[in-house]
Amino acid sequence: MTTEVHELPEVGEIVVATISKITAHGAYATLDEYNDIQGFLHASEIAHGWVRNINKFVKSGEKKVLLVKRIKEGREEIDLSLKQVSRDQQKKKLVDVKRFEKGKSIIKSVQEKTKLSNSDVEKLEDKIFSKYDSIYDGVVDIATNGIKVFGDLKLPKKTLDVIEEVSMKIKLPSVEIRGILELVDNSSNGVETIKNSLQGFEKTNQDNVKILYIGAPKYRISVTASDFKSAEKTLKPILEDIQKNIEKNKGSFKFTREESRKTGEG
């Protein structure tokens, strides 16, 4: 008789699990990333305070981001916690899982197009992981900077060509920051001056800056970039120039931020 040995998560690790059974004292959950081994989420670890109705917080078949609280390795008993996982940790884990799944899909596509064996695919993955934390990170680098970034991995040209082809089809992560401009120009043709000025900024940065006329004196400006820092770097000098031009004509300038958002996968 042989005993199957499962790979176990580490204590403190954030995992994705599927709730499999609700009991009077908590819920059993299978760990998606660890061959569906089972853990237990005690009622006291579901939420802060007294949990009167477990079904209010977790439901059978539902996926949850959980913390591995304790492991009894001899019996492979895993205690889990929901209440100790912050909202930011939940979001990050779900993004990581989404990227992992995309990476798997990309490798599968490359294998189908190149007819690589499973052994060759493993070697390809090892080479990518020698440079990147994930397949997805490598593909995003290609989509952003070109296939040359894989040059040091010494891959066959046919494989590189297919990876490049697949990479160019993915939607790059992006963010958008935006706000409302309230502009008043007191010169005789103030409205036209403002419109022409704003159109100039939009044309200069046409790929990532959009300015929409809402109705005098309001305009919405939005900047799209790969990350918030880059977006802010683009927006700041534009706002400074607009303010300078408006105040030069004894006009008034006001900028009110709206909620920023991610517009692409991240």
Image: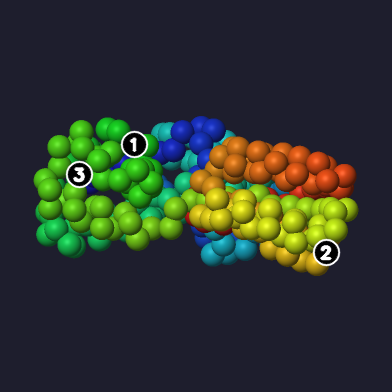
How far apart in space, not on screen, are marks 3 and 2 (Cα)? 57 Å
Q: Secondary structure at mark 2?
A: loop
Which residue is identified by label 2?
216
Whether residue 216 is situated above or below residue 27 in the rendered picture? below
- Left or right: 158 as drawn, with respect to 99: left
Residue 51 x %, y %: 76, 52
Q: Residues within 10 Å of mark 3 (few under 14, many from 20)?
A: some
| Quarter of the view holding residue 182 | bottom right
Q: Earlier in the sequence, mark 2 or mark 1?
A: 1
Query: In 3D space, how far apart are the residues under numbered discs 3 and 1 (Cα atoms)?
Result: 12 Å
Disc 2/disc 1 C-alpha distance (Å): 49 Å
Amino acid type, label 2:
Ala
Q: Residue at x 28, y 58 (%)?
A: 166
* Contact between labelled residues 2 and 3, with CB atoms less than 8 Å apart: no
* First along the sequence among labels 3 and 2: 3
Residue 20 image point, x, y percent: 52, 60
Residue holding disc 3 = 124
- What residue type is disc 3 on? Leu
Question: Can residue 160 be seen?
Answer: yes
Q: Which mark is residue 132?
A: 1
Mark in front: 2 vs 1 = 2
Residue 200 occupies which quadrant of the picture? bottom right
Q: Residues within 10 Å of mark 1 (few under 14, many from 20)?
A: some
- Identify the secondary structure beneath mark 3: helix
